[in-house]
Amino acid sequence: MKGPNGKAARMLDTSETAQENSHRKYIKPAKFEGTSNPRQLRAIAALLRRPTPRAQLDDIVGCSNAPELVAELRRRGLDVPCQRINFVDRDGRLCKPGVYSFPLSDRRKLYRWMAGRKATNGERS
């Protein structure tokens, strides 16, 4: 099928599966190797405590672009899904802010990494 410019038109997949997996546009490493980035460490600590809205994650982490920070965690091997919730803003309008969380698979990767990190730091002391 050709588009208006004569080039092949791209078909968009609007199925639920495509939307749920839209953040997976790259090859993700099988194993989370960790991070030493202070902002990523603060994000990990916050998300291990509880699911966190994007705006709150900006404040907790100390950045103004939490989605890019989460994208980097995804590139490092975590899933970090973002659930869109229904919310009424201060003007009474319905909006759908994103809430990030760690699924069980991410928590296992993180606990494994943290245990290895603790063991490595213990050897140096």
Image: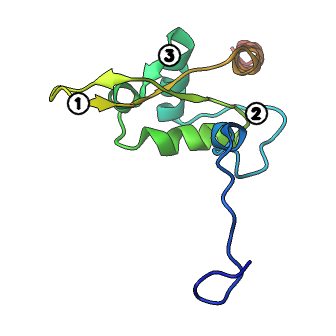
Mark 2–mark 3 distance (CA, rounded to whole Å): 22 Å
**Mark 1 or mark 2, which is nearer the start of the sequence?**
2
Mark 3–mark 1 distance (CA, rounded to whole Å): 23 Å
Q: Amino acid at mark 1?
A: Arg
Q: Residue at x 84, y 36 (%)?
A: 30
Mark 2–mark 1 distance (CA, rounded to whole Å): 42 Å
Q: Residue at x 62, y 29 (%)?
A: 80
Look at mark 1 in the image and give the residue it sits on: 93
Label 2 CA crowd tier, 10 Å (few <14, some 14–19, many 20+): few
Label 1 CA crowd tier, 10 Å (few <14, some 14–19, many 20+): few
Are the two marked residues, 3 and 1, in contact with CB atoms closer than 8 angstroms?
no
Mark identifier at residue 51: 3
Q: Amino acid at mark 3?
A: Pro
User: As drawn, which residue projects farthest toward the left?
Assistant: 91
Look at mark 2 in the image and give the residue it sits on: 33
User: In the displayed structure, would residue 26 be above or below residue 79?
Assistant: below
x, y percent for residue 38: 49, 32
